[in-house]
Each structure stands twice: as C-alpha cells, then as structure tokens.
Image (cartoon, rainbow, N blue to C red):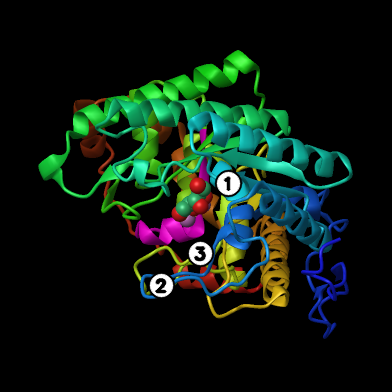
Amino acid sequence: MTKFFADIPKIQFEGPDGTNEFAFKHYNPDEIVMGKRMEDHLRFGIAYWHSFAWPGGDPFGGQTFDRPWFGDTMDLARLKADVAFEMFDILGAPYFCFHDADVRPEGATFAESTDNLNAIVDYFAQKMDAGGPKLLWGTANLFSHRRFMSGAATNPDPDVFAYSAATIKTCLDATMKLGGENYVLWGGREGYETLLNTNMGRERQQAGAMLQMVVDYKHKIGFKGAILIEPKPQEPTKHQYDYDVATVYGFLKDFGLEGEVQMNIEQGHAILAGHSFEHELAVARELGIFGSIDMNRNDYQSGWDTDQFPNNIPEAALAYYEVLRAGGFTTGGTNFDAKLRRQSLDPEDLILAHVGGMDVCAAGLKAAAAMVEDGALEEARNTRYAKWDDSQNAEMLKSDLSSIEARVRRDNINPDPRSGRQERLENLVNRYL
Ligand code: XLS
Ligand code: NI
Ligand code: NI
C-alpha cells in the first residue's frame, strides 16, 4: 500500500438520499437495467494520463500537482502504477486505459523505451492477475515528444513515419499481452498548421497506409479487440484530419477500411467540432461504426479541449440513449478522458471527481433506459415517418424523376405540412430525468 489515498475508503453505493461524499448515489454496479448489470452497461475505464501523468500545467504556468511519483525512473513508474491500481480499486473501476508515454520513462533509444514499456506491462499484468481491473484500451502517444511536432503517420519525414509505425507495433503488442479489448488511434498531430508547407494529398496517403498496416498487424497477431479511431477537430494542429465521425467515415471508405475500424467518440471533441455528443454517437450508429466513448465535458465558451469531468445528467441521458439505440457497448466502454482543474490539488479531489462522473453517467443511463423502455419517443419518431411505409412511397426511392413527376400530376400531390413537435418531445424527455 502507498500512502497517497491513505484515508479514503472504498466507494460503495449508498443511494440518492445519502450525504456521504465518498459514496455513489446512482452507480450501483449490480443493479439491473434493461436486463443487464449497470457495471456491464457502463464499462467504466480510468484514463492513466490525466489522473497520474498530467502535472497541472496551462499555457501560462507549469506544474501545480506535486505527486510523489513524478520523475523519469522505473522505480517512480512502478510507484505510479501502485497508486493508480489503488485508485482503480477504491473506485471499483472495471477498466483502465493508457498510452505508452503515461506509464514508462522515455529511454535514450527506441529499444530502451520499448524495454521500459515491456517491464511496466509485466508489472501491470501481475496487478491485473491479482484481481485488478481489465484493460479497455491501449494506445501510443505520438504527439507529445518533439519528434512528432509535424505529425506521426503524416509527417514529411519518413523516419518519423517509421518511428511511429514501430511504436504502434509495440503498443499493440502490449495491449494484446494485457488482454486489452480495443486499440485506439487518436490523430494527435495528424493535421497541419499552414498549407504553405503542406502536401495534403501525400499526408492522406501516408495516413491510409499506416491504418492499413495497423489492421494487417492486428490480424497477423490475432488481436481480437477493435481498432478505434478517435475523431477530433482543431487541436493540437489548426486543421486536424480526423475532424469528426462523418469525416473519418469518408477516409475509411476511401481506403476500404470501414468494416475494420470503429469510432471512439469524445464529448469534448464533438463540441469542438460544432456538434453535440449525441449527434456524433448517432452518426456512428447509423453508419455502423460505433465503438466506444471518451466521457468528459467541454467548456462551451473556451474553444479548446478542457477535458472536465461530466456533471450534466440531461446531456449524459441523451448520450446513453444513443448508446442503447446502438445496442450498447460490445468491446467499448465509458473511458473518463477527464482531468482535474489545476487548482484541485488533493488526492480526495481525484477520487471525488471520478465518483461524481460515475454517478452522472449512471443517472444518465437510467434515464436513457426509461426512455427506451417507455418507447414514447421512438413511437413519436416513427409516426413522423409513417407515410414512408406506404408501398407507393417506399418504391419511389427506386424510381426516377420523370415517373415521380407523372405521379405528382396524376395524384395531384400537394404536401400538407405537419408539426415537428419539438417542444412536446423536449417536455417528454424531461419526464424521465
Ligand atoms: C486528446 C485525446 C486523447 C485520446 C487518446 O484530446 O482525447 O486523450 O483519447 O490519445
Ligand atoms: Ni480522448
Ligand atoms: Ni480529448
């Protein structure tokens, strides 16, 4: 045991009326929701990077957190792992997620960095075998080190492409070794700052080739998890290539990989793209590429990715409604890609941020399940499209403009507008919250 969370008890469910801060009010892992345990619906994951690797800096100031494991040695990396697994246990989190750079010190060479990673992976494996959480996903950090300043796969320098490919291989190996259920590719610095120095066509081909190699390697080693792309616009580069779900789908179609890759959708990234979270989830569901979620909350004014813990139950409800409409998670889950504010210094802050986030998701899931089970919202949606069930109307989609014109004249078609009933539906949704 480390001393970091010394006075903090294991968090238990005490119900919505309790006043104990260190208890769940809504997240009750064994409670059955739509025939499934709540824990199995939500599949919570803790992000190693925000909770254990981020020092609390912003553009105007450096480190605010003073953690005993900060530093670049293997001993400190093991201490960090000890604290991390203690937190997973306190929260009862069934999963965690990590980048290579979150968990191991950078070595002097590629080989040394990989040795460091593999040693920590073995250390994780012992903890996981001893009853620790499972790995929701692994990923490679191909954006923090200065070698990646002009991108990874899309870098103008083929040496960086090579370094990135080799790094992804080692991270996929690590993910497979730990039984990870997914492997994530977030674009990092795959984008550009200025067209004046950028060959977009080349960069797109490089990105497509890299993704193909990732998929090939997954099959070669027999990795059973899903490959997930995480879309994000305008950060860190001004023009990120994986802007949103629809953009990534076009890219996948271009390279024939739409059957191989799914989406990891993040609330904050959806907001930065000018969408709502539920919009991005619905697009992925409709296109058959929904995979997993990065749960957080973006500031609606700031214009950058603030990665705050979620605290808005009505928003979470609409998000989980889309997750349920997609049939729920299979390999995916709810990863808290969320960090403390830099003034939230205490170990308690780290625990309570997650407790609150887990409760918001659980309350959102329960409301979403009530909406699904009641069915009134879907019935209203179906009614709106009901005329399409008529065979003459359905067949029109396989028809042609001239025949349709003839039909409009013959039947004297004269559309009669009907209410979209938005406010009534908004009132209906509020009934479940
Ligand atoms: C950054 C991303 C990142 C990915 C994993 O904005 O959200 O944290 O989830 O690389
Ligand atoms: Ni993310
Ligand atoms: Ni993000």
Residue type marked 1: Pro
| Residue 177, label in figure | none
Image quadrant occupied by the C terminus:
bottom right
Mark 2 within 8 Å of ligand 3, using the beta carbon: no
Residue type marked 3: Asp
**Residue hosting label 3:** 307
Residue stretch in magenta: 262-277
| Residue 167, position as x, y percentages in the image | 50, 31
Look at the image and say whether residue 97 sits in the magenta stretch.
no
- The number of discs equals 3
From the viewer's perspective, is the residue at label 2 or at label 3 nearer?
Answer: 3
Mark 3 crowd level (few <14, some 14–19, many ≥20, 10 Å Cα): many
The answer to the question of whether label 2 and label 1 lie on touching residues, with beta carbons closer than 8 A, is: no
Real-space CA distance between mark 1 and mark 3, rounded to the nearest whole angstrom: 24 Å
| Residue 404, position as x, y percentages in the image | 25, 32
Mark found first going from the N terminus, 2 or 1: 1
Tell me the residue at 26%/53% (across/down): 238
Look at the image and say whether residue 267 sits in the magenta stretch.
yes
| Residue 144, position as x, y percentages in the image | 42, 49
Does residue 43 appear anywhere in the picture?
no
Real-space CA distance between mark 2 and mark 3, rounded to the nearest whole angstrom: 12 Å
Answer with the quarter of the image where residue 116 lies. top right
**Residue hosting label 1:** 105
**Residue hosting label 2:** 300
Q: Is residue 306 above or below residue 331?
A: below
Tell me the residue at 46%/61% (across/down): 268
Tell me the residue at 14%/41% (across/down): 197
User: What SS does tag 2 mark?
Assistant: loop
Q: Is residue 352 above or below residue 332?
A: below
Mark found first going from the N terminus, 2 or 3: 2
Q: Nearer the viewer, residue 180 or 259?
A: 180
User: What SS does tag 1 mark?
Assistant: loop
